[in-house]
Image: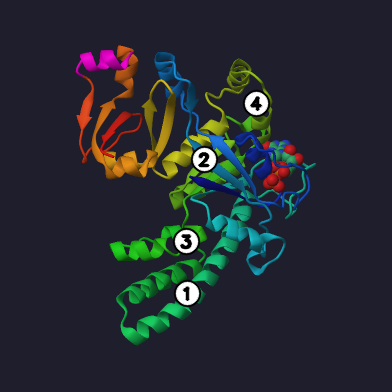
């Protein structure tokens, strides 16, 4: 399953965000090092298309896509050297597909900042540096080993890897993240991916602002936006504390009213999940039957058999063809039969590139 890790200095609002993202409860408290266990929660990916389709199909249940989220606490200056509880948690980051980097962009004298003042740019650099140092450690160890292999046998793979490691090393030593380094050849890209460097993971910066800045952002968040633009990274402005209040409301109407008052169209949590999806190039196809209407996650560009494999490996192995209905057609014609009658049901083969929102029915041999 897709896994996102939340990182940031203590007291920037990680647990608060984690709490409104997932049903699992992490303890948010004004106390550095409070959350020491990596908390894992599961979030459902909001998708109004599922609800609309369910109104037509009347399935037994609706099954949205899910994303695992890990609250990685304890990262502080010196973490890569084992200070605080950091070193242990760096390992948790390695297992994630993407990083959500939370930055404190709100003033509040009652909430202690580990470094005394509010400065999200400095905070970002502290976390970046720790992750970079850890990556350098990984690279040095690997380099020692692979340089020997490459020297002895003229091993081509080892040589490629050494080249990749050296390119990374040079960038990291300049304080750059591994994700800024690009490789041309397929072999290099493959070698790079196999290193699982922390700073090569895609990142989404979340600026945690106060309620008054929920819609507009503030000077702190604008500084982060400037930096992110240079990095080509994504930024999201969220009022964490307010989101927590919104999440605690019972009904959809109440939530919507609260959002309207703030001038927001959609909750920050929803925006965050959608951003995480696009960051990772993920899309959704849907299966709609009497039993369930269900969302399935696949990577943009995948063809029909590969998507069939998401449901079951047998579907991929025995793939014959796919029947595809475009979401808009399903809604317009109001039933699968009507879509079929209108000639809008597509019969697609092995080369069909699945599109976001496609309603799929796979035919396969067993
Ligand atoms: P973590 O250590 O990064 O997980 O931070 P927490 O989520 O535990 O938050 C630390 C404290 O800051 C808690 O008391 C939160 O209620 C408070 N807090 C979180 N987000 C905001 C915010 O946007 N504004 C204000 N004023 N306080 C916040």
Q: Residue at x 61, y 41 (%)?
A: 41
Does dot 3 land on a helix, a strand or a loop? loop
Q: Does residue 20 belong to the magenta stretch?
A: no
Q: Which residue is mark 3?
A: 196
Q: Residue at x 44, y 44 (%)?
A: 279
Q: Position of residue 40 (x, y in %)?
A: 62, 45
* Labels 2 and 3: the sequence-earlier one: 2
Q: Which residue is mark 1?
A: 142
Q: Which residue is mark 4?
A: 246
Do the residues under discs 2 and 3 have CB atoms within 8 angstroms? no
* Labels 1 and 4: the sequence-earlier one: 1
Is label 1 or label 4 in front? 1
- Left or right of 185? Residue 41 is right
Is label 2 or label 3 in front? 2
Look at the image and tell me whether residue 298 can be seen: no
Residues 117 and 183: in front is: 183
Q: Which disc, if any, is residue 274? A: none
Q: Position of residue 232 (x, y in %)?
A: 43, 49
Residues 105 and 355: in front is: 355
- Left or right of 153? Residue 169 is right
Residues at marks 2 and 4, CA–CA distance in whole angstroms? 21 Å
CB of mark 4 near ligand 1 (< 8 Å): no
Q: Position of residue 54 (x, y in %)?
A: 44, 18
Q: Which residue is mark 2?
A: 67
Does dot 1 land on a helix, a strand or a loop? helix
Residues 67 and 208: in front is: 67
Provide the residue span drawn in magenta. Answer: 335-343
* Labels 4 and 3: the sequence-earlier one: 3
* Labels 3 and 1: the sequence-earlier one: 1
Is label 2 or label 4 in front? 2
Q: Main secondary structure of the magenta part?
A: helix
């Amino acid at each position: 399953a897709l896994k996102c890790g939340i990182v940031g200095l203590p007291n920037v609002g990680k647990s608060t965000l984690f709490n409104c993202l997932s049903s699992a409860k992490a303890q948010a408290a004004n106390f550095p090092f409070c959350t020491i266990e990596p908390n894992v929660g599961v979030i459902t990916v909001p998708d109004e298309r599922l609800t609309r389709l369910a109104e037509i199909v009347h399935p037994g249940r609706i099954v949205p896509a899910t994303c695992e989220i890990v609250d990685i606490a304890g990262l502080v200056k010196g973490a890569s050297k084992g200070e605080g509880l950091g070193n242990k948690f760096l390992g948790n980051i390695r297992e994630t597909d993407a990083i959500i980097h939370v930055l404190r962009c709100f003033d509040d004298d009652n909430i202690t900042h580990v470094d005394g003042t509010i400065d999200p740019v400095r905070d970002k650099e502290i976390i970046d540096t720790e992750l970079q140092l850890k990556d350098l450690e990984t690279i040095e160890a690997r380099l020692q080993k692979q340089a020997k292999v490459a020297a002895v046998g003229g091993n081509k793979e080892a040589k490629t890897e050494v080249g990749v490691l050296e390119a990374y090393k040079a960038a990291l030593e300049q304080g750059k993240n591994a994700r800024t380094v690009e490789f041309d050849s397929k072999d290099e890209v493959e070698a790079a991916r196999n290193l699982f460097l922390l700073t090569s993971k895609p990142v989404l910066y979340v600026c945690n602002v106060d309620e008054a800045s929920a819609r507009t952002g503030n000077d702190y968040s604008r500084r982060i936006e400037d930096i992110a633009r240079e990095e080509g990274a994504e930024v999201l402005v969220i009022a964490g504390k307010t989101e927590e209040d919104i999440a605690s409301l019972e009904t959809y109407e109440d939530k919507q009213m609260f959002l309207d008052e703030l001038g927001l169209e959609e909750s920050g949590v929803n925006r965050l999940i959608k951003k995480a999806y696009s960051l990772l190039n993920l899309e959704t196809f849907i299966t709609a039957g009497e039993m369930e209407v269900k969302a399935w996650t696949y990577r943009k560009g995948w063809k029909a058999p590969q998507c069939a494999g998401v449901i079951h490996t047998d579907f991929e192995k025995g793939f014959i063809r796919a029947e595809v209905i475009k979401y808009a057609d399903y809604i317009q014609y109001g039933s699968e039969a009507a879509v079929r009658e209108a000639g809008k049901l597509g019969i697609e083969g092995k080369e069909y590139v699945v599109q976001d929102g496609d309603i799929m029915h796979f035919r396969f041999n067993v």
